[in-house]
Every structure is written in C-alpha cells, then in structure tokens.
Image (tube, rainbow, N blue to C red):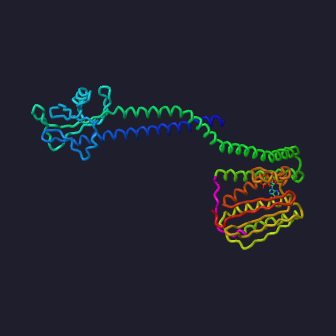
Amino acid sequence: MFQRTLRKLTMLNAGVFLLIFILFGYLVYGYVAHQLFSDVDDALRYKMEATHLVNGQIHLIANQPWLLDPQVFLFLRDSDGNSIPYHPASLADLNELQTFIMQMKSNPLKVQKINEHLYRVLAMPFTAEQQVLLRPDGSEAKIVQVIALTRIDSEVAMLKKLLNTLVASLIMGVLAIAIAAYFLAKRALVPIKASWDKQQQFVADASHELRTPLAVIKSNTELLLRHPEHTIEQESIRITNVLREAMRMKKLVVTLLTLARADASQLELQKIPFNIGEVIADVVEQFIPLAEIKGVQLKFSVDGVNEIEADKERLLQLFAILLDNALKYTSNEGTILIHCYQNANFVVIRIEDNGCGIAPEDLPHVFDRFFRGDKARSRESGGAGLGLAIADWIVKQHGGKIQLESELGLGTKIEICLPVKSV
Ligand code: ADP
C-alpha cells in the first residue's frame, strides 16, 4: 500500500520540481531576452530622436553624442514612399534593407531576417520641425518616417546559447530531480507510516481488549441457557459476571472514544476558574471507602494554592485515574500521600504510594496506550492500560507536565504541574 503512495508522491514531487525548474528557466530566459532587446531598442530610439533636418541636410543632434550607436542604421522615408538611406553606407545588405523598408507598411518594432542576418527594426513618424530634405539633384522630399535598424545576430546567438544551456541542465537535472523527489517522498512517508502502524496497533489492541469481556459474556449466557429451570438466585454468579464484563466493556468503549476524539482534535476543554485543592479533596473523598476496604491509608494535604483556569471534569477524571492506579497497585497496609502546593505560576500535585512500583524496563512505556506492566494482574484489577495515556493527554492539553518516578517494590511518585492560567 505504501509502495503505491510512494510512487505517486515521487511522481508528484518530481512534477512540481520540474515545473518550478521550467518556470525558473522561462523567467531567466525572458529576463535576459528583455534586457538585451530593451538595450537595443533604446539605442534605436535614441538615434531616431537625434535625427533632424537642418537646411535640407540630415544632422544627428544628440544630447550625449557618444551614446549614438554606429551599428544603428537609419533610413528616412519621404511622402512618396521612397526610402533614403542615411547611415548604411558601408553595409553590404543595403539593397535588401531598402527592399524590406519599401515593403514595410506599419510602424513595427520587430525582428526581421534580412539576407542571413537578423535585424531589430523600429519605425516612427518623423515629427521634427523641419521636414524637407534636399535631394542631390536639388529636388525637395518631404520626410514622413524615420526607420532605424540594427543587427542582433550576437544577441540572438547569446539567447540561443542560454536556451541550450537551460535545456541541457534540465535534461541533466531530470535525474537529480527524480532522485530528490524519491527521497523526499520517502521521508514524508516516515511519520505517516509510523502513525498508520500506531493506528493499526491501536485497533488490534482495542479488539483484543474487547474480545475478552465478550467471550466471558458469551460463555456465561450459554451456561445460563443450559439450565432454564434455574432461578435468578441460583444463577446470580453468572449474571453478575455478565454485568461486570458489560460494565468493563462500557468503560473501555468510553475510554476508546475519548482517545479517538482526542486524536481527531474533537475534544474541547471547557475551562473555568476553580479551586484545585477542593477538586482533589472531592476525588480523595470518593476513594476513602475503597481505601479503607483495602486497608490503605489516604493522606491529603494542600498548601495555599491559587485558583486555576482549567477543565474541571477532565481534572476530576485525571485525579480519579491516578488515585485508582495508586490504590490498585498498593497492597494492604500501604500509604498514599497526595500533596498539592503552589510553585510560582504552577500548581504542583504529587501523588506518592508505597505500592509494588514499576520495573525499570517498563518505565518508558507506562504512558503508551494499552501498556500494562503486569498483564495478568492489571486485567484482574480492571485496567486496560489506557489510564496513563489519557492522564498524559489531559495534562498536555492544559499546557502542563506529568512526571513519573518509580522503584520496583518501593513505590511510585507522580508529579503534575499545571499552569495557573491555562494556555
Ligand atoms: P492500567 O489501566 O493497566 O492501570 P495505566 O495506563 O493506568 O493502565 O497504567 C499503565 C501501567 O503502569 C499499569 O499497567 C501499571 O503496570 C503501571 N502503573 C501505573 N500506575 C502505577 C502505580 N501507581 N504503581 C505501580 N504501577 C503503576
């Protein structure tokens, strides 16, 4: 599946690179051509504007005579349509130029091939004060148009060279582009593949977790059906089993839904200001009977904390998860200490137990979804390995930090820092 995506992505990348390359080449070529021709056109215009008639003779009157390009040739056209060459005396192509100018109708600015040479041609109406030219035979000609042209062979050759270079580098670049596109596509796929694998693992783990309660429900109801004559009292154990597993499944499905929504960023925090000490005291209160049954001591203290702005429901859920874990993994006669205090702009909550602790090799994984330290024991005590994953999400959503330290056989300490003003 990823091979096809990789191929498609590579092609897409290569296409984009190629397009950028071609566009860049086009812009470079266009810019150079524009610069070259605009210099040529300036030289043509300058010489045309310098053309004047003084006492029937042609004079070039320019502001800066040294800018008059000797390679620009001038023709004047009289009202009868004859063209009079002014400056092409030494030009071999004179006849062809004159023929071209005779046939020229409009006032173009264009490139023209005349006798194997390329010319840039510009024609303008002749608007100088004096318009009468004296011909060698003494007759008068009224000049109406001035035409300037210059050879642009070297400019065109240069552009051709540039084009060849661009095409050659494009051909060589295609291979480099293909390789770069492939590596980029491969790199882009790494996080996608990782997240896909994670998702696959999540689905597999979730199905596995759901399979066990389903199997228990199925086997218990089958046993119930074997003895239709039994009373509810007689079958109370099996009915209780079914109920317990159904509750476990419900809890699991709710948790899975929370995580799925969190992943899709569909869960919004409802932040309100409240006293965190009171919220923790409420949760502790709920756990006191359970702790008493188990013979575990619950000690809670709070040192003047400020109000914080947070999602109260989510924080209740967070402390319930952590206290539930502390109680689950602390044996009889154990102690759980909960301490809450202010540290600069943070409220710190520390939950410490002297329970079984976590093996060092398990520590890096405790916040992973579906991770259970001791699989058999956790399942027995009702955990699916999702509690700490949710706790981690809640803390991070509030811009806080959660840290866990543990020593096998000695106990576990969890510290949570929550900003007073949530981000
Ligand atoms: P579970 O539902 O299995 O408790 P959690 O995500 O809450 O899942 O915890 C993951 C694992 O981390 C647990 O299976 C357990 O091995 C370990 N763990 C978490 N809290 C404690 C604790 N207070 N003491 C010892 N082990 C803990």
Using residue 116 as the reference point, say whether residue 9 is left or right of it: right
Q: Residue at x 74, y 73 (%)?
A: 303
Q: Within the image, what quadrant is residue 196 found in?
A: top right
Task: Inspect the magenta stretch and tell me whether residue 272 lies in it.
Answer: yes
What residue occupies the far bottom of the structure in this picture?
Answer: 304
Is residue 401 found left or right of 374 in the rendered image? left
Q: Horizontal and vertical percent for residue 313?
A: 69, 62
Q: Is residue 334 left or right of residue 63?
A: right
Residue projecting furthest to the left: 138
Q: Nearer the viewer, residue 41 or 304?
A: 41
User: Residue 381's x, y, as percent?
Assistant: 84, 55
Residue 167: x and y, percent?
A: 47, 32
**Foreground: 107 or 68?**
68
Q: Nearer the viewer, residue 339 or 266?
A: 339
- Which residues, given as a range, are shown in magenta? 265-277
Q: Quadrant of residue 419?
A: bottom right
Q: Quadrant of residue 392?
A: bottom right
Measuring 13% from the left and 39% from the top, which residue is drawn there? 56
